[in-house]
Image (cartoon, rainbow, N blue to C red):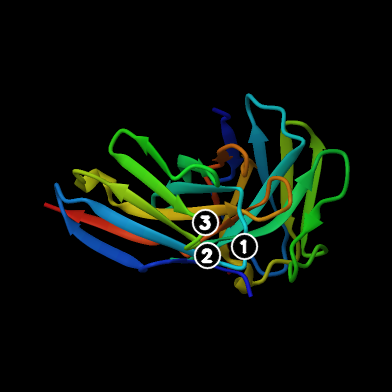
Amino acid sequence: GAVVSQHPSRVICKSGTSVKIECRSLDFQATTMFWYRQFPKKSLMLMATSNEGSKATYEQGVEKDKFLINHASLTLSTLTVTSAHPEDSSFYICSVGGARTEAFFGQGTRLTVV
Amino acid sequence: SQKIEQNSEALNIQEGKTATLTCNYTNYSPAYLQWYRQDPGRGPVFLLLIRENEKEKRKERLKVTFDTTLKQSLFHITASQPADSATYLCALNTGTASKLTFGTGTRLQVTL
């Protein structure tokens, strides 16, 4: 199956700064990647669909100016949390595939905003 | 409104017993239903996929059923082991090509 590498695994940042999270598909060319957010002991909530070479599709209620997504190549999507606040602290996970076939997830990124 | 609910937030069973987890959904007509395992601080790992025209799927000690009339899937782990302790998530494809929507999850704890 596909190998998805997410970096960093943990990051602590100060309020007001921006943080970039990378998601790489190591052995699979992904025209579409997905970004999820997960709160403690809660399920995964889809934030947006990252589309290679075009704009991301955001789920209802997700601020696109807050969570910038770039999918410049078939193997890399990035999520930038801009002007981070403590309420943005969460576990962010990316994936490729899904629905008709299994989805492959990255290791996740634990973001803590202080 | 659309909902995907898993029967209990937590389930404790004794080693060797069969664990049965439930996934119920409303206002969806999924073509596929999947089950994932998630360990703390990690991304989910795929376990099984079942299609709407399949009633049952097995893989080693795992079995999944899918009843589109009841809008329910059951996930069984037979001869459970402490290493099976994790959170288990069901997921549906919800219309748009590859989007997956996840259930609330069940934390399974298998004790000796």
Task: From the top left corner, tell me how far across and down residue A84 is, in percent.
Answer: 69, 66
Query: What is the chain identity of the residue bearing mark 3?
Result: B
Instruction: Look at 72% across and 33% down and name the residue there.
Output: A30
Please determine if labels 3 and 1 lie on a single subunit.
Answer: yes
Q: Amino acid at mark 2?
A: Tyr
Task: From the top left corner, tell me how far across and down residue B81 is, in percent.
Answer: 20, 45
Q: Amino acid at mark 1?
A: Tyr
| Label 2: element kind | strand
**On the rendered structure, is A81 left or right of B69?**
right
Residue at image mark 3: B68
Please determine if labels 1 and 2 lie on a single subunit.
Answer: yes
Above or below: residue A56 compared with residue B4:
above
Q: Earlier in the sequence, mark 3 or mark 1?
A: 1
| Label 1: element kind | loop
- A47 or B75, which lies in front? B75
Q: Are marks 1 and 2 in contact (CB under 8 Å)?
A: yes
Query: What is the chain identity of the residue bearing mark 2?
Result: B
Q: Earlier in the sequence, mark 3 or mark 2?
A: 2
**On the rendered structure, is A36 left or right of B66?**
right
- B65 or B111, which lies in front? B65
| Label 3: element kind | loop
In this rendering, which labeled residue sits more in front, label 3 or label 2? 3
- A5 or B69, which lies in front? B69
Residue at image mark 2: B25
Q: Quadrant of the N terminus of chain B?
A: bottom right
Residue at image mark 1: B28
Task: Measure how far apart labels 3 and 1 are at the Cα level.
Answer: 10 Å
Task: Measure how far apart labels 3 and 2 are at the Cα level.
Answer: 10 Å
- The circle drawn on residue B65 is none
Above or below: residue A62 compared with residue B37:
below
* Quadrant housing residue A5: top right
Task: From the top left corner, tell me how far across and down residue B62 is, in percent.
Answer: 32, 41
